[in-house]
Image (spheres, coloured by chain):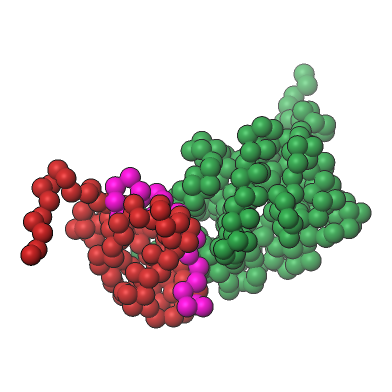
Chain colours: A green, B red
């Protein structure tokens, strides 16, 4: 099962085309990534996308995917830590997947320390290092915050900048092996030219240095765990304590 | 004088990748050859790419749809390097300043197998 939690949402038409393309290439689940400002507009037409989306459109027998789900993800992008905390409080109950766009060292730290955040997206964004050190890696591991590597950053760069990005990816992978925080691989696609076959994507990340099981976890199990965990998040009272509905005390 | 063909045991073993190409602008087979070689050399380097033994065997133009040019092709590569070719092709995004994307449809041991399974 392949899940892509980062496909850039734009408007109804482009989202529908991207969803069809992702289905065609064998993805089982995609989440359209919207910034916190546009999240409410997007949630208005998500149901319409789901309704219009029919598997009958696809003729390619090898890649047609019948169990295909679409969802939204809210991405907080702000350099002000107080504003981020405010946005987290505001958006946490309304979305199944909440992420913070990294890059700034303070933002990376705030994201890794907050248990309410699911994903720290692109901690290396506009930086001259990978954006994560052993301290943040430990925090991310304790708070179960996933670190996201975005394939589109590789696609949009070339020569020395691409080489540097690959170096940052490897640095994050090394920390992932040591501290075992959740790692997520995503496409970050904003057009049909950015969507790739999930198997091609796995081979790319294997070439970088991830092992078979690590790639499978990052592209399948970890995103699935995040979505499942968030379905029951309302019932969590404390860390490790969950309210079970329908439980009879007598 | 033409060289004698190598006996089968000494020949290189090949695999055939069926690929799907979406391009913003119309491309020819020659341009695809340049694009695949360029992608592999850029991503894997000259030394590694020399092992790939890349050849575009077949090139099919499909009907245009959704505002892009759609093609399929059969690409020959050396056995054991298929995954590296796949990953190299997946990072190709631009050809002559126009967007292009290459996805792998599948892998086969023969050209006819690849055509019957992934092209038709």
Which residue, as the protein is rendered here, is positioned at the far right?
A82
> Residue at 59% across / 52% down in the picture?
A166
- Residue A151 at x, y = what percent? 58, 56
> Residue at 74% across / 45% down in the picture?
A132
- Pick the front one: B23 or A192: B23
Residue A197 seen in the figure? no
- Pick the front one: A138 or A161: A161
- Residue B74 at x, y = what percent? 28, 62
Q: Is residue A175 left or right of residue A100?
A: left
Which image quadrant for residue B75? bottom left
Which image quadrant for residue A134? top right
- Residue A33 at x, y = what percent? 67, 60
> Residue at 66% across / 32% down in the picture?
A178
Against A140, residue A100 (above or below) is: below
Against B119, residue A150 (above or below) is: above
Against A134, residue A69 (above or below) is: below
Against B109, residue B38 (above or below) is: below
Residues rendered magenta in the picture: B77-98
Q: Is residue B111 left or right of residue A15?
A: left
Q: Is residue B92 magenta?
A: yes
- Pick the front one: A39 or A185: A185
Residue A59 seen in the figure? yes
Q: Is residue A21 magenta?
A: no
Instruction: Name the quarter where the C terminus of chain A is drawn.
Output: top right
> Residue at 44% across / 80% down in the picture?
B25
Which image quadrant for residue A34? bottom right
Q: Is residue B114 left or right of residue B1?
A: right
Q: How many badges with numbers are in the image?
A: 0
- Residue B115 at x, y = what percent? 24, 61
Which residue, as the protein is rendered here, is positioned at the far top?
A250
């Amino acid at each position: 099962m392949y899940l892509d939690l980062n496909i850039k949402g734009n408007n109804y038409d482009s989202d529908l085309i991207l969803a069809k393309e992702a289905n065609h290439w064998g993805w089982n689940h995609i989440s359209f990534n919207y910034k916190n400002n546009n999240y409410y507009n997007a949630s208005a037409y998500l149901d319409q996308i789901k309704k219009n989306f029919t598997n009958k459109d696809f003729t390619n027998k090898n890649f047609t995917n019948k169990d295909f789900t679409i969802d939204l993800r809210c991405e907080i992008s702000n350099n002000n830590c107080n504003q981020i905390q405010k946005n987290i409080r505001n958006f946490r109950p309304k979305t199944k997947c909440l992420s913070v766009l990294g890059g700034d060292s303070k933002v990376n730290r705030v994201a890794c320390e907050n248990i309410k955040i699911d994903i720290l997206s692109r901690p290396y964004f506009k930086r001259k290092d990978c954006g994560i050190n052993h301290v943040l890696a430990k925090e991310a591991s304790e708070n179960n915050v996933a670190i996201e590597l975005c394939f589109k950053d590789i696609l949009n760069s070339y020569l020395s900048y691409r080489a540097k990005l690959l170096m940052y990816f490897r640095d994050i992978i090394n920390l992932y092996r040591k501290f075992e925080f959740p790692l997520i691989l995503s496409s970050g696609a904003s057009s049909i030219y950015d969507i790739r076959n999930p198997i091609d994507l796995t081979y790319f990340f294997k070439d970088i240095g991830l092992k078979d099981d690590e790639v499978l976890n990052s592209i399948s199990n970890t995103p699935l765990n995040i979505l499942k965990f968030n379905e029951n998040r309302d019932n969590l009272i404390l860390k490790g304590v969950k309210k079970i509905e329908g439980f009879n005390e007598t | 004088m033409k060289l004698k063909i190598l006996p089968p045991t000494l020949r290189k073993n090949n695999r055939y990748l069926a690929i799907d190409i979406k391009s913003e602008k119309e491309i020819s087979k020659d341009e695809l050859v340049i694009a695949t070689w360029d992608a592999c050399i850029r991503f894997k380097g000259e030394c590694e790419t020399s092992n790939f033994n890349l050849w575009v065997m077949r090139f099919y133009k499909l009907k245009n749809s959704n505002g892009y040019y759609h093609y399929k092709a059969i690409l020959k590569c050396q056995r054991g390097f298929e995954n590296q070719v796949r990953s190299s092709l997946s990072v190709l995004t631009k050809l002559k300043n126009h967007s292009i994307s290459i996805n792998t449809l599948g892998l086969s041991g023969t050209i006819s197998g690849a055509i019957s399974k992934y092209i038709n």
